[in-house]
């Protein structure tokens, strides 16, 4: 089934969306969410569009979130769809910081220069574990696959008048250089697994390979079109700007030039 689409205004959003997306004029759209109305799914799929830098932030893990009475923490993976020249992601810090250093740097703004700002281009992907201090820069369009939890602690927001969460954020942070092996480049052909659990799994590939992956599955799948068109055996049609939630063994047909992401819930 086609999941419900929610457009979210953000101060760092854009006033023009890529072809295939419905743009509600007069708004700066920063995020587009896909979920099931009234019955949230365990994973949340988002598109993010940035004209300015996002806040420097951090997410707790499941145990830390449970201690606060929350259902789960939040880990996520970013697949970069488009990036303007000079676009960067801040992932981790350039050197290990003590928690006191992190707090002080967040208060005085020096954290901007302590972040590891990585140049990015279309086709890059990065897994962001809980506790990773991170920020998305300007001029980027990406797909985010995450645990379906609304728990973000802002450490620094470039002077914007929004609430910070220093106590909570510092407490769950691991301010250190990023070295997670679940990052790299997406292949331009074939089926490629980007993430292999435990919280979720993620693949990317062309239409024929993805159709086989889904048809052989005994689990539900989220299907996120990046290029081209898809039609399900039930007659639903989807393209960029849509997200399908498919039952085990679902049949799809895709255009020859299509590329898409497929996500599944974790293995534990």
Image (tube, rainbow, N blue to C red):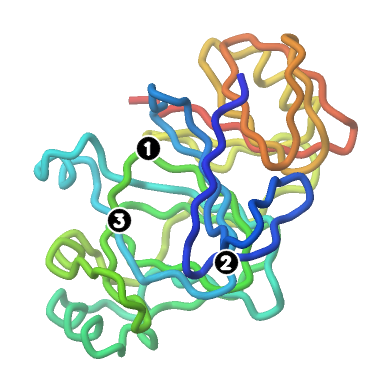
Q: Dividing the picture into quarters, in which one does residue 5 lie?
A: top right
Query: Horizontal placement of 16 versus 164: left or right?
Result: right
Residue 249 position within the rendered picture, expressed as x and y whole percent measured from the top left: 63, 9
Packing grade of label 2 (10 A; few <14, some 14-19, many >=20) is: many
Q: Nearer the viewer, mark 1 or mark 2?
A: 2
Residue at image coords 47%, 52%: 127
* Residue name at image x 70 percent, y 57 percent: 17
Residue wearing tag 3: 152
SS for callout 3: loop
Q: How many marks?
A: 3
Q: Are marks 2 and 3 in contact (CB under 8 Å)?
A: no
The local secondary structure at tag 2 comes to: loop
In the picture, which quadrant includes the N terminus? top right
Circle 3 packing at 10 Å, graded few (<14), some (14-19), many (20+), is some
Can you tell which mark lies on residue 180? none
Label 1: which residue? 148
Q: Please tell me which residue lies in front, 206 or 136.
A: 136
- The residue that appears at 59% across and 14% down in the rendered structure is 217
Rounded to the nearest whole Å, what is the CA distance between mark 1 and mark 2?
21 Å
Q: Please tell me which of labels 2 and 3 falls first in the chain.
A: 2
Q: Nearer the viewer, residue 182 or 168?
A: 168
Give residue 29's position: percent from left, percent from top. Answer: 57, 58
Q: The C terminus appears in which quarter of the rendering?
A: top left
Q: Earlier in the sequence, mark 1 or mark 2?
A: 2
- How far is the residue under mark 2 from the one under mark 3? 18 Å
Q: In this rendering, is residue 21 above or below 255?
A: below
Q: Position of residue 174 (x, y in %)?
A: 25, 65
Which residue is disc 2 drawn over? 50
């Amino acid at each position: 089934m086609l999941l419900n689409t929610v457009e979210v205004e953000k101060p760092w959003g854009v006033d023009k969306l890529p072809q295939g997306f419905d743009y509600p004029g007069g708004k700066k759209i920063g995020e587009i969410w896909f979920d099931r109305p009234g019955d949230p799914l365990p994973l949340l799929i988002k598109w993010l569009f940035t004209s300015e830098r996002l806040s420097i932030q951090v997410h707790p893990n499941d145990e830390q979130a449970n201690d606060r009475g929350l259902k789960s923490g939040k880990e996520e993976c970013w697949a970069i769809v488009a990036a303007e020249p000079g676009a960067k992601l801040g992932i981790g810090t350039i050197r290990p910081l003590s928690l006191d250093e992190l707090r002080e740097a967040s208060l005085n703004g020096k954290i901007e220069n302590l972040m590891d700002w990585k140049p990015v281009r279309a086709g890059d992907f990065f897994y962001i574990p809980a506790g990773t201090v991170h920020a998305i820069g300007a001029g980027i369009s990406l797909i985010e696959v995450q645990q379906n939890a609304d728990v973000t602690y802002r450490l620094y927001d470039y002077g914007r008048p929004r609430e910070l969460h220093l106590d909570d954020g510092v407490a769950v942070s691991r301010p250190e250089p990023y070295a997670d092996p679940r990052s790299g480049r997406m292949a331009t052909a074939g089926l490629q697994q980007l993430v292999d659990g435990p919280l979720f799994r993620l693949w990317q590939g062309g239409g024929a390979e993805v159709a086989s992956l889904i048809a052989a599955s005994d689990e539900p799948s989220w299907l996120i079109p990046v290029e081209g068109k898809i039609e399900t055996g039930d007659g639903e049609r989807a393209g960029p700007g849509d997200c399908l939630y498919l039952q085990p063994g679902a049949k799809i047909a895709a255009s020859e030039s299509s590329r898409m992401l497929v996500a599944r819930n974790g293995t534990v």
